[in-house]
Amino acid sequence: MNVPIHQITLSNGYAIPSLGFGTWQTPDGQTAVNAVKTAIDAGYRHIDTASIYGNEIGVGQGIRESGIPRRDLFVTSKVWNDDRGYDKTFTAFEQTLSDLGLDYLDLYLIHWPASKSRYHNWEEINLETWRAMTELYKAGKIKAIGVSNFLPHHLNALMHTEIPPMVNQIEFHPGQMQQETLDYCNAHHIIVEAWSPLGTGRLLNNPTLVEIAKKYSKSVAQICIRCCLQHHTIPLPKSVTPARILENAEVFDFEISKEDMAMIDAMPYCGGSGLHPDEVEF
Ligand code: A2P
């Protein structure tokens, strides 16, 4: 099965597939290996992981065993909060490359901003991390750099650096459209990626989505993913179940109408993780 996933161009001209495969909460070992191989076999070419997920070894093995040339895959990882800062970012990056068994990354992200509420020098910490990412980018070890869970005020501090972020990966799904952050990113040529597009599964029985899904003869998961695509974000659905991995990629053969998109956009807050970048305790 090969799904027609198209490419989006980042602000530096690098191409990123419009749908990615999420691996948050995927256990390392054979589960991660099998999930990644199944996804690549189903047509995904964009794999998203992070050092804190603890599965980079299995994800890397899955990538190598897929038989697809490295250059045809787009691989993302993220620097964890304990590794913020200039020197630590380099060390974390080398560890990630070694665990994945790769010699470059397509995209590397700051996983969470140092936040105002926890650090008086939050701007400086983010800038120092960013300075290391910029050097790795300029050295060709990362093809694109970005951030995750950054709100407009966190982004503002990076917009006047030598290389501004190309991507912001945020929690984005029906019931949690971060409109202000999306608008900011659109205005600054930052592509938004959607983590937990299914609300980590919490949206699957939502009555509004169930009704809409029936109308299109699609699953609620497919409606959630399609909705992210129609908002020009890059959804990163996670699954370890082969049938679901395939189902989540079959989202390019239908379009949600304007009216139904409006209904989804008007849904009250639901399905969210409750994690606020300025309030998280990690
Ligand atoms: P599993 O990995 O056991 O298949 P999100 O991408 O929003 O974080 O959601 C991931 C969660 O949703 C996981 O628990 C995953 O379960 C489940 N899931 C993924 N795809 C589907 C699907 N198509 N139908 C039902 N549940 C799904």
Image (spheres, helix red, strand yellow):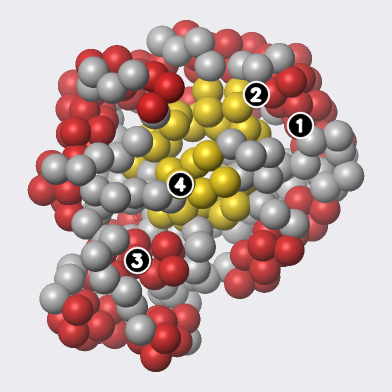
Q: Position of residue 76 (x, y in %)?
A: 49, 32
Q: What amino acid does circle 3 point to? A: Arg
> Disc 1 or 2, which lies upstream in sequence?
2
Q: Which mark is in front, 4 or 3?
A: 4
Say which residue label 4 marks.
7
Q: Position of residue 49 (x, y in %)?
A: 43, 32
The CA span between labels 3 and 1 is 32 Å
Say which residue label 1 marks.
130
Mark 3 neighbour density, 10 Å: few (under 14) some (14–19) many (20 or more) = many
The CA span between labels 1 and 2 is 12 Å
Say which residue label 2 marks.
83
Find out whether the residues at labels 3 and 2 contact each other: C-beta distance under 8 Å. Answer: no
The CA span between labels 3 and 2 is 34 Å
The CA span between labels 2 and 4 is 31 Å
Q: Which mark is in front, 4 or 1?
A: 4
Q: Secondary structure at mark 4?
A: strand
Q: State the quadrant of the C terminus.
A: top right
